[in-house]
Image (cartoon, grey):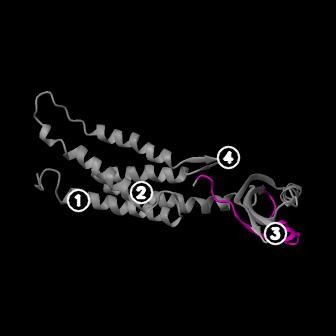
Amino acid sequence: MFGTAAGQGLRQFAELGLALLLSLLIGLERELQQKSAGLRTHTLVGVGSALFMEVSIHGFGSLTGVPGASVDVSRVAAQIVSGIGFIGGGLIFVRRDAVRGLTTAATIWLTCAVGMACGGGLPLLGAGATLVHFLVVRGFPLVTRRLVSGRTVSQVELRLSYRTRRGLLGRVLELCTARGFRVTDVHITSEARESGKVKEADVVLGLEGRTSAHPLVEELTEWEGILGVGLRAHRDSTE
């Protein structure tokens, strides 16, 4: 049972260790980006996939020579590919028109493949796929930004703190559209709160436009009743 010959030798432990290292690197990148699936999830998926492959290849040796018994090592691998979709699907969600979690779900899928490659005795392919992950996730956004710079519609988030019951939100929306921006999302981040006898609220507006939003911010800071204005680039909706 505890022998090191029947698929439990140094090679198999080395393959599990390599799957641990590569999936940890992918998970660390997702963790640093503060995504919903981070270091632990990717590491467990990678090591678990590698172990499934080890069991698929080495775990049924006792059936060799048994009459009527057939061993197909590809069956477990096929079930891993279909089963990992449940984890990936759970990471994707839609809020209004924004789809989030696609990139993270794809990295889960890739980490599973990396683990399977390591467990199946193809460590170089697993290492190459890990490098491809960093090339795509880190390198592609830089390239696409340069290619489409100045030609695409910019997406920003405008954060406002304002006094309620003055019609300010409606006036802000009118100003945004008048300045050439399209309002894609209106999200109240906190309910109206009492500040003395004045109620205050926070709102996040998703804006799309071809011009800079900084003049818009400068004008809003001069409005009476606007308590705070913030601006930041819109996050990639597929992450």
Amino acid at the residue labelled 4: Arg
Depth order, front residue of 130/186: 186
* Mark earlier in primary sequence (2, 4): 2
* Mark earlier in primary sequence (4, 3): 4
Marker disc for residue 197: 3
Amino acid at the residue labelled 3: Lys
Local crowd size for mark 4, using a 10 Å CA cut-off: few (<14), some (14–19), many (≥20): few
Depth order, front residue of 176/46: 176
Q: Which of marks 2 and 1 is in front?
A: 2
- Residue 3 at x, y percent in the picture: 10, 55
* Mark earlier in primary sequence (4, 1): 1
Q: What stretch is highlighted in magenta?
A: 209-238
The residue at which mark 4 appears reads as 96
Secondary element type, mark 2: helix
The residue at which mark 2 appears reads as 41
* Mark earlier in primary sequence (3, 2): 2
Mark 4–mark 1 Cα distance, whole angstroms, equals: 46 Å
> Hey, which residue is sitting farthest front in the picture?
197
Q: What residue lies at 44% left-to-right and 47% top-to-bottom?
A: 87
The residue at which mark 1 appears reads as 13
